[in-house]
């Protein structure tokens, strides 16, 4: 009975807590012990509180003690239930951690950042629970849930992650749209057109224009059935679209052009029969005569020629594109060449065949070149993409989503196109070539035997009459006192800007000439007959000789009074040409069509075979690059010191026997207009 009447420390603690709640002092959640140590701590606190409140506390009756006991049992039940719930919640988060990481990986996010922050929050929560910090327990759980919410909102629920799906595998090269070809049905009128062969067609706005060689008839048909047929007195050889619904056709044998649309046609006479034409601007066209090489710019309203220039080969088709650049195909070379309308060459693109004719169509900023079954799409800068359409065709016309081609049986075919039809990555087969930089007028260009650039602003011209003149880059003669050689030099080479070296074969002697005075030095006699000589560095030169039935290369030191041979290199034959730079020299073997590279001390380094353009005529150098001239095809190819080709150039006219190269500029004599053209390569 005494135990029941006397309140225990735990009961006093509960009673004390009850009074404090009644007074409104403590409104927080009750604290419960977690283990034995915590209960002992609470007992000690209860004992201390008993000593301070013993005199003030009244004894409660039995009914109140029973109510307090029931509340104590209910509080313990609430504690264990809530603790177990929170512990289950933590375990749930731990167990679902792997699932969350897998989910983050699937959407392409970094799981390590999530695990770091998540683990840190869990550790803080568990640490506070072990310390029985019940107030912080609720706050930490709130922070953890807030952390998860912010993490999802910041990293997953943003606009760029609204649609959560596995990452797509993106291939490096997308598949091309297949070539879908369907035969174009053109309704013919009358029996005479049923068996006609269409050799050319061009698409216009809401219609098509065709030409039948069998009937010599131009037919303009629209989608609504309207047609306009024009019977021509002779063959039509070329079409060009001059507006959305009008086409210009040329009749070279009648010296006429025909302008036809679905509702009208006009006939204009011009002063020459143009075999190929393309529309330029206003009432101006660009064309070429049959078997001709001259490109004419003609105004058909006034019937006058505005401009003209000459190409190397006979054109097979021409087209004017953006920025007024002119693309021309040729019959005898597998290249498409781009010009300005004034004749300046810009770049070249190599095609796959020498025998198949090429036709050009223009749409927006691209040229479309048809050669056999290959269509090349060429940009204004020379970038190339190509497609094989699987059918050899003879004409092409391009619009927005369709390419219209005509095969060799006269059947038109339509090819559907879209943005996936052409390869995404273009290749660059264009061969950048030198462009005309300047020109210098000289006298009697036919009698020039040698051109020797002394500097960027002075050129030495040697004539057959044993005279030499020094010109500026503007064409003025620097020294009026012409130099007269002892005899016509067999060859000469530049030493530096102040002097050059000549060799007289009959006299078997070298001679230095100063510039710009053109003063002659003493004759330096030698015992050897040299075929060719070039400069290496300082007074060191390279020469070829064929004395005593053997061919050798001599490395020479040429002083003011004597010549020393410091190295001899034996060759198999004399059909060679040489050139040198300060770090190496090259021997071109014409018989085997190759270049052999040597060091300046005479050690053979490597060999490089040349393309099959016939026997190389000569090789030049400018201390950085080598230039091989193929005279038969008028082709100049530039190589670096490692034998890699830098560019290839088709010369604009048959080459003069003597050209020159200095610091990347090609000096090319124009015998027709008595001038020297300066072509500069722009990298």
Image: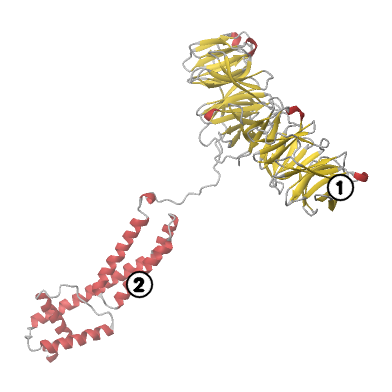
Nearer the observer, 113 or 322: 322
Quarter of image, res 39:
bottom left
Earlier-in-chain disc, 1 versus 2: 2
Callout 1 touching callout 2 (CB < 8 Å)? no
Task: Report which residue position mark 1 lands on.
Answer: 552
Instruction: Give the structural element (helix, strand or loop) at label 2.
Output: helix
* Mark 1 neighbour class, 10 Å CA radius: few under 14, some 14 to 19, many 20 or more: many
Q: Is residue 576 left or right of residue 34?
A: right
Any part of residue 511 in sight: yes
- What's the residue at 15%, 86% (across, down)? 49
Q: Nearer the viewer, residue 300 or 438?
A: 438
Is 367 drawn above or below residue 506 in the view shown? Answer: above
Residue beneath the point at 10% across and 86% down? 53
Q: Position of residue 432 (x, y in %)?
A: 63, 38
Q: Alpha-carbon neighbours of circle 2 within 10 Å: few (<14), some, or many (≥20)? A: few
Which label is found at residue 123? 2
Most extreme residue toward the bottom is 2
Quadrant location of the N terminus?
bottom left
In the image, residue 655 lies at what x, y percent? 73, 31
| Position of the C terminus by quadrant | top right
Image coordinates for residue 421, horizontal then vertical, percent: 54, 35
Q: Secondary structure at mark 1?
A: strand
* Way the structure is coloured: secondary structure
């Amino acid at each position: 009975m005494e135990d029941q009447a006397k309140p225990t420390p735990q009961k006093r603690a509960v009673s004390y807590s009850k009074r404090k709640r009644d007074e409104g002092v403590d409104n927080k959640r009750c604290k419960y012990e977690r283990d034995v140590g915590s209960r002992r701590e609470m007992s000690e606190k209860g004992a201390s509180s008993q000593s301070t409140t013993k005199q003030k506390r009244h004894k409660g009756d039995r009914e109140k003690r029973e109510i307090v006991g029931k509340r104590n049992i209910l509080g313990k039940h609430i504690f264990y239930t809530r603790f177990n719930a929170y512990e289950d919640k933590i375990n749930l988060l731990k167990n679902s951690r792997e699932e969350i990481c897998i989910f983050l990986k699937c959407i392409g996010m970094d799981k390590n950042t999530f695990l770091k922050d998540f683990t840190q929050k869990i550790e803080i929560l568990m640490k506070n629970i072990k310390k029985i910090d019940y107030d912080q327990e609720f706050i930490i759980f709130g922070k953890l849930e807030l952390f998860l919410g912010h993490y999802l909102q910041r990293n997953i629920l943003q606009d760029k992650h609204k649609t959560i799906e596995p990452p797509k595998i993106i291939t490096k090269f997308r598949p091309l749209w297949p070539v879908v070809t369907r035969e174009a049905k053109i309704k013919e009128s009358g029996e005479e057109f049923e068996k006609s062969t269409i050799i050319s067609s061009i698409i216009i706005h809401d219609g098509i224009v065709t030409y039948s060689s069998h009937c010599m008839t131009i037919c303009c048909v629209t989608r609504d059935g309207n047609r306009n047929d024009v019977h021509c007195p002779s063959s039509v050889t070329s079409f060009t679209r001059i507006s959305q619904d009008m086409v210009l056709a040329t009749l070279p044998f009648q010296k006429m052009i025909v302008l036809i649309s679905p509702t009208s046609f006009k006939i204009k006479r011009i002063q020459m029969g143009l075999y190929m034409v393309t529309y330029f601007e206003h009432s101006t066209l660009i064309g070429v005569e049959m078997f001709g090489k001259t490109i004419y710019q003609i105004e058909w309203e006034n019937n006058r020629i505005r401009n003209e220039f000459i190409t190397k080969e006979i054109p097979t088709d021409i087209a004017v594109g953006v920025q007024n650049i002119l693309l021309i195909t040729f019959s005898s070379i597998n290249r498409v060449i781009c010009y300005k309308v004034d004749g300046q060459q810009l770049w070249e693109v190599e095609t796959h065949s020498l025998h198949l004719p090429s036709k050009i169509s223009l749409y927006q900023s691209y040229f479309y070149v048809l050669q056999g079954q290959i269509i090349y799409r060429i940009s204004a800068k020379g970038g190339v993409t190509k497609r094989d359409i699987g059918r050899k065709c003879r004409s092409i016309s391009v619009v927005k989503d369709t390419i219209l081609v005509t095969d060799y049986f006269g059947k038109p075919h339509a090819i559907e196109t879209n943005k996936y039809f052409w390869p995404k990555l273009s290749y660059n087969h264009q061969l950048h070539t030198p462009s005309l930089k300047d020109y210098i007028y000289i006298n009697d260009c036919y009698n020039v035997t040698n051109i020797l650039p002394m500097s960027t602003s002075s050129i030495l011209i040697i004539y057959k009459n044993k005279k030499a003149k020094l010109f500026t880059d503007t064409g003025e003669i620097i020294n009026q006192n012409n130099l007269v050689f002892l005899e016509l030099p067999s060859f000469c080479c530049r030493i530096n800007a102040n002097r050059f070296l000549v060799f007289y074969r009959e006299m078997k002697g070298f001679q230095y000439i100063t510039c710009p005075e053109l003063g002659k030095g003493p004759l330096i006699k030698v015992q050897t007959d040299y075929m060719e000589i070039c400069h290496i560095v300082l007074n060191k030169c390279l020469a070829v000789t064929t004395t005593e039935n053997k061919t050798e290369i001599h490395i020479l030191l040429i002083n003011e009074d004597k010549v020393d041979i410091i190295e001899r290199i034996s060759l198999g034959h004399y059909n060679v040409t040489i050139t040198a730079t300060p770090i190496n020299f090259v021997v071109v073997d014409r018989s085997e069509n190759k270049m052999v590279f040597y060091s300046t001390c005479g050690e053979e380094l490597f060999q490089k075979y040349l393309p099959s353009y016939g026997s190389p005529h000569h090789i030049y150098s400018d201390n950085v690059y080598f230039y091989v001239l193929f005279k038969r095809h008028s082709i100049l190819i530039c190589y670096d010191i490692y034998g890699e080709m830098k560019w290839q150039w088709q010369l604009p006219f048959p080459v003069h026997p003597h050209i020159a190269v200095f610091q990347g500029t090609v000096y090319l004599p124009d015998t027709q207009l008595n001038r020297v053209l300066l072509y500069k390569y722009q990298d």
